[in-house]
Amino acid sequence: MMLIQQSSAVQDLEFLMVLSSDGRTKATGKTPAVTIRKNGGNFAAPAGAVSEIGSGWYRVVPHATDSDTLGSLVVHAEAADCVDTDARFFVVAFNPRLASLGLNNLAAADILTTPANKLATDGSGRTSANVVQIAGQTAVAAAAVTFPASIGTSTFAGGAVTLTSAYDAAKTAASQASVDAIPTNPITSLTGIATTAGLAALQAHGDLAWSTATGFSTLTAAGVRAALGLAAADLDDQLDTLASGVLGARVAAESSDVKLSTARLGKIDVITADIATAATRLLTTLELDGSVYRFTANVLELAPVGEGGGGSGGGLTPEQEAQLATILAHTQLITPGGFTILSPVTQDGLTISATAGDSWNIPFANLGSLVGVQKLWFAVKNQVNDADVSSLLFIDLTGLVYANRADATEPSLGPLVIEDTATGAGRIKVEEAVTVQLRQVSTAKWAIKALTATGDTITLRTGAFHITPASIQAIA
């Protein structure tokens, strides 16, 4: 429950509207009729205006009149084709938006009055700087402060504790004098380096005792080079020496590896050329007829003479028959559309065929960019104009919604997943527990549709969907 400060005009009164058709789709573009009920009152129109925030959310604009009564504050909203919604807030005297919750401004009557053993307050309602009572005992700050015997009995082994040290003006003045004596620049005030000459000596490593101490070196720059075996002061000369020695040997070794890699690249070029030649031969044997690939007339002329044959020779050679068998084995994988369907679901162009009682795995690709898409739907219907609730299958990004013209009870049995938003690739899977209930439908239609990031709805693909009855009903 959200807290709102009394008589403030800061916090929106927010509420969510969903469509009554399914009870979960966010309702946008609505004009809700809103009433509010303050603590102990009746429902009435709010003083603040009602406006839409977005994505199904609306608000009552903050108004001091709407929050002028402490306690419960209820917002009720209604709109056409929407489920009635209620939101509850709670009006408080303090500011819940502050880290302190406004507790430093509570009235004295709330915490600091009777009984007498509580802290006294000043005239503004805050705790007084001069504590006048502790546990019913008068405490005088200018003299001794005596705690009651009960404190000493319960807290200390001895009796009552008496603080006898009073305020001492002389001690306070002495403390202030010590603070004032701290130098403005402590570095220049230290003995031995207060002068410019002292700082120069420090820069030159200080005195002899320091420069010869364990851990410090007295070597000059030339001495360091000599210790490392670098006689010349010119760093460029030293690098040239290294390059002609260790680095030169390393470069030669790496060059040998590069030569070996070049030889491997030559082999890759040969393999790539072979693949290109095979692809060219395959393209000359097939041509696209509408949405289906078929063999060209030149290939059919090579068919053997006899039943069903149409060629002019004595048939294909064993090598040609082997090549043709390879082509036939891979022809079903060639698709001109955006969907690539795997067994046990098959595709002929944009026509999908599947068997009831099987697990359906339907990957899709090349739908275009799905970046920022709000919703994605996949539906299979007996007739194109059937309502969504009458779908054989209706799936969105939350899972299975409708199956066999009824509400789905387990959305996880039909997930729809986007795997690549850039190219529009993903996967639809329907478990066998759902497909076994579907009837044979020779005229079914399928479609996939998106609600884009800009709020536009676009049908991305459509086609025919054939469902073959299950010859075996068992699924487990």
Image (cartoon, helix red, strand yellow):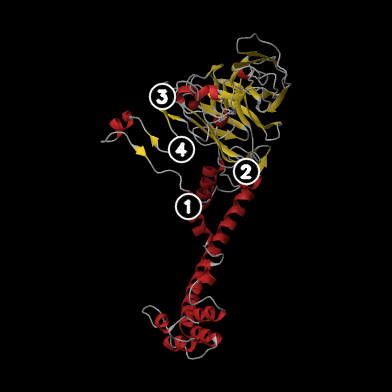
Q: Position of residue 120 (x, y in %)?
A: 50, 28
Q: On residue 170, which mark appears?
A: 1
Residue kind at label 2, given as amino acid type? Thr
Vertical order, 45 against 393 (above or below) = above
Residue occupied by mark 2: 423
Residue kind at label 4, given as amino acid type? Ala
Q: CA distance from mark 3 to mark 1?
A: 97 Å
Q: CA distance from mark 3 to mark 4?
A: 88 Å
Residue occupied by mark 3: 475
From the viewer's perspective, is 261 left or right of 87?
A: left
Residue occupied by mark 4: 141
Looking at the image, is mark 3 or mark 1 earlier in the sequence? 1
Q: Position of residue 105 (x, y in %)?
A: 58, 29
Q: Position of residue 150 (x, y in %)?
A: 32, 28
**Quarter of the image where one finds residue 428:** top right
The quarter of the picture where the N terminus appears is top right
Residue kind at label 1, given as amino acid type? Ala
